Amino acid sequence: MNIEKYNFQKLSAAFALLIFGLSSIPGDYLPREIFFSWDKVYHLIEYFIFTLLVGMSYITSDERRLRMKWIPYTLRIGLIFPILDELYQSLIPGRYSSWFDVLADLSGVTIGILLLGYYYEKHFSEKS
């Protein structure tokens, strides 16, 4: 049993709940940006971190099959979860769903997978 894997799984699940929790905040309770909205940067960072956690759950897996296919599995979650999050957010009073938010999320997913790919090649590819 690989303890690291279970820690990354728990962190991934906790971070997913945090994302949905933040998406549950009604629009009236969110701060208003006057000159510049950091909203898209927040989306990118949020899904970058989420992708690192999900990817490491697969990379540190005891199962070789999961380690070898960490990219498609991580990408699948990284494509579906932001869309579901935006759809959920559209149900919250004062919140709006935006494809630009999804694009920012997917940018974070892409950067996370690229960084993890580099890390995987350096540290894990020989062990697979």
Image: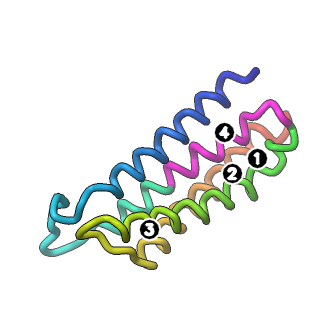
Of the residues shown, which amino acid type is indicated by label 3?
Glu
Kindly identify which residue carries mark 4: 57
Q: Which label's residue is closer to the chain start, 4 or 2?
A: 4
Quadrant of the image containing the N terminus: top right
In the rendered structure, find residue 86 and report the number of the disc placed on it: 3
Q: CA distance from mark 4 to mark 2?
A: 16 Å
N-terminal of the two: label 3 or label 1?
3
Picture coordinates of residue 106 (x, y %)? 54, 67
> For the residue labelled by badge 4, is the local secondary structure a helix, a strand or a loop?
helix
Image quarter (top left, top right, bottom left or bottom right) of the C terminus: top right
Question: Residue 79, position in %: x, y?
Answer: 61, 65
Q: Residues within 10 Å of mark 4 (few under 14, many from 20)?
A: many
Separation of residues labelled 4 and 1 (CA atoms): 16 Å
Near-viewer residue (75 or 14): 14
The residue wearing badge 1 is 121
- The label on residue 118 is 2
Q: Nearer the viewer, mark 3 or mark 1?
A: 3
Please say if the residues under marks 1 and 2 sit with CB atoms less than 8 Å apart.
yes
What is the x, y in percent for residue 88? 43, 64
- Looking at the rendered structure, the kind of residue marked 1 is Glu
- Disc 2 element: helix
